[in-house]
Amino acid sequence: MPLRTSGAPAIVAGTFQGGCFMRRLLCAILLAASLTTSTGCFLPIYSADPGRRTEQLIYTSEDLRAFVEQWERIWFVDQPDHMTPRRVHGGVI
């Protein structure tokens, strides 16, 4: 197959002449790796308005607080221990 002398790269067996394909592939892989490992989110999770953001943060913290209480209730951590020295009823009187 004769070599082309024009300025445009010729496609030969799926690659560009001169190794440009490998360079572009490596740059694309590095760009994808740097974009996927960045911290944060492309779209922010909270609003830019300070009042609305405060409201969203309060709701989030209340949800997390309620989650801890539900977790303790599921695992019966909120119940009195049977090894207490005092007699405790433990139920609703």
Image (spheres, helix red, strand yellow):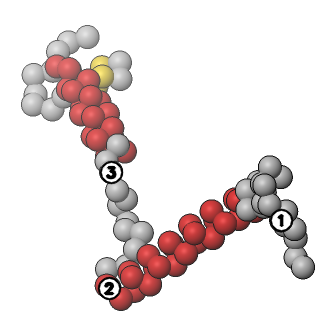
Identify residue type, mark 1: Val
The local crowd at label 2, few if under 14, some if 14 to 19, many if 20 or more residues have their Cα within 10 Å, is: few
The local crowd at label 1, few if under 14, some if 14 to 19, many if 20 or more residues have their Cα within 10 Å, is: few
Task: Write down the residue under mark 3.
Answer: 39
Q: CA distance from mark 1 to mark 3?
A: 50 Å
Identify residue type, mark 3: Thr
> What SS does tag 2 mark?
loop
The residue lying furthest to the bottom in this view is: 51
- The mark nearer the N terminus, 2 or 1, is 2
- The mark nearer the N terminus, 1 or 3, is 3
Task: Write down the residue under mark 2.
Answer: 49
Q: Is residue 69 left or right of residue 12?
A: right
What percent of the width, then of the height, locates residue 77? 73, 56
Q: Residue at x 35, y 43 (%)?
A: 37
Which picture quadrant has residue 53? bottom left
Q: Name the foreground residue: 61 vs 35.
A: 61
